[in-house]
Image (cartoon, rainbow, N blue to C red):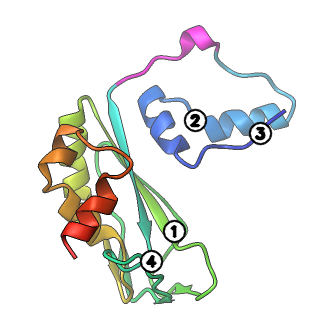
Amino acid sequence: MNTRLQVEHPVTEMVTRIDIVNEQIKIAAGAGLSFTQDDVRFSGHAIECRINAENPQTFVPCPGRIAYYHPPGGLGVRVDSAAYQGYNIPPHYDSLIGKLIVHGNTRNEALMRLRRALKEFVVDGIETTIPLFDRLLGEQDIMNGEYDIHWLEHYLSDNS
């Protein structure tokens, strides 16, 4: 049996209201699922931003000490992170500081919550990808959902 989680599982959890990790633990302990496929209902829209310790333009890793850490909160906002003020990000690491996930009844509501959450998210002492996500929310293609896997590459080369 494959027991791996997708890295974006919080998005699925937000739109289904099902704690996938909890269900996986129950299954590993020998219990069955607490729901059936017919019980799964999708509600709203969720977006995930991977907040990395990287230069927001070049994606060069930025190891160092987090001088100040303040994650956002509020309705429809979730942050999965083990980072904290004073944490030292080593030079040999996975650059992920945390995952910011927002949920709204509509895509527009989720985008508005994401904009607010990015403004509230503070990680000082190192560079992060937060400014990139903030800039991307000002792009009409992103707001309209009109992008593909090459969009960011073109955007970064045009705005360097």
Cβ atoms under marks 4 and 2 closer than 8 Å:
no
Cβ atoms under marks 4 and 1 closer than 8 Å:
yes
- Residue at image location 39% in from the left, 86% down from the top: 126
Residue 45 in the image: x percent, y percent? 32, 32
Label 4 to label 1, Cα distance in Å? 6 Å
Residue 15 in the image: x percent, y percent? 42, 30
Residue indicated by mark 1: 96
Residue 123 in the image: x percent, y percent? 35, 78
Local packing at callout 3 (Cα closer than 10 Å; few below 14, some 14-19, many 20+) is few
Residue indicated by mark 3: 3
Q: Which quadrant, please, contains the C terminus?
A: bottom left
Q: Nearest to the eye among marks 4 and 2: give it.
A: 4
The tag earlier along the polypeptide, 4 or 2, is: 2
- Residue at image location 44% in from the left, 82% down from the top: 60
- Residue at image location 62% in from the left, 78% down from the top: 93
Is 40 part of what is drawn in magenta?
yes
The tag earlier along the polypeptide, 2 or 1, is: 2
